[in-house]
Image (cartoon, rainbow, N blue to C red):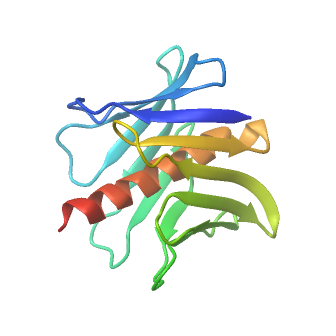
Amino acid sequence: MRLYFKQKVFSFRQRSEIFDESGNVMFTAVGEILSLGRKMHILDDMNNEIAFVQQRLLRLLPRFSVYIGGQFIGDVVKQFTLLKPHYTIDELGWQISGDFFEHDYSISCGGNYIASIHKRWMSWGDSFEIDVAKDQDIVMALAVIIAIDCVIDQSQNSY
């Protein structure tokens, strides 16, 4: 399934919408305004929370905990690398590998393809194209994208 993640530029609450191939809003990601660390809620089309992504503070490398349906699923952890970004979710065995420019990512588990993420170069606000192999992995793939986007935002804002 192919989805499109579009971050709103002038949004006080870090709001993003996730569309299907027909342009229908399937999910919305909304950030908390005043919180320690980033906290993002993923809502379905009826505004019910289906997932929650929370930054873990006081860590050497960025780490985000993912909760789906109120249950802890795993931590998206950025690994120390020199050239290409790499993330893991040890609890699921997922490996997320990026390219040098942090625009393309692939998610795999034990060598099996789970999803790919492509960040558009020239767009107003962050915009991603997501291709997910199995429908049951959609919400977790969205949580991974949100965590990676938060890490990229923090690294760009730290200069």
Q: Quadrant of residue 122?
A: top left
141 relative to 108 in the view: left or right: left
29 relative to 144 in the view: left or right: left
Location of residue 116 with respect to 82 vertically, above or below: above
Location of residue 79 with respect to 69 vertically, above or below: below
53 relative to 91 in the view: left or right: left
Image quadrant holding the N terminus, namely top right
Q: Residue at x 50, y 36 (%)?
A: 5
Image quadrant holding the C terminus, namely bottom left
Location of residue 130 with respect to 16 vertically, above or below: below
Q: Quadrant of residue 71?
A: top right
Q: Residue at x 70, y 67 (%)?
A: 93
Q: Residue at x 52, y 39 (%)?
A: 70
- Residue 94 or residue 19, whichever sits in front: 19
Tell me residue 88's x, y (percent): 58, 69
Tell me residue 16's x, y (percent): 40, 32
Q: Residue furthest front?
A: 122
Tell me residue 42's x, y (percent): 47, 33
9 relative to 151 in the view: left or right: left
The total number of labels drawn is 0
Tell me residue 73's x, y (percent): 59, 53
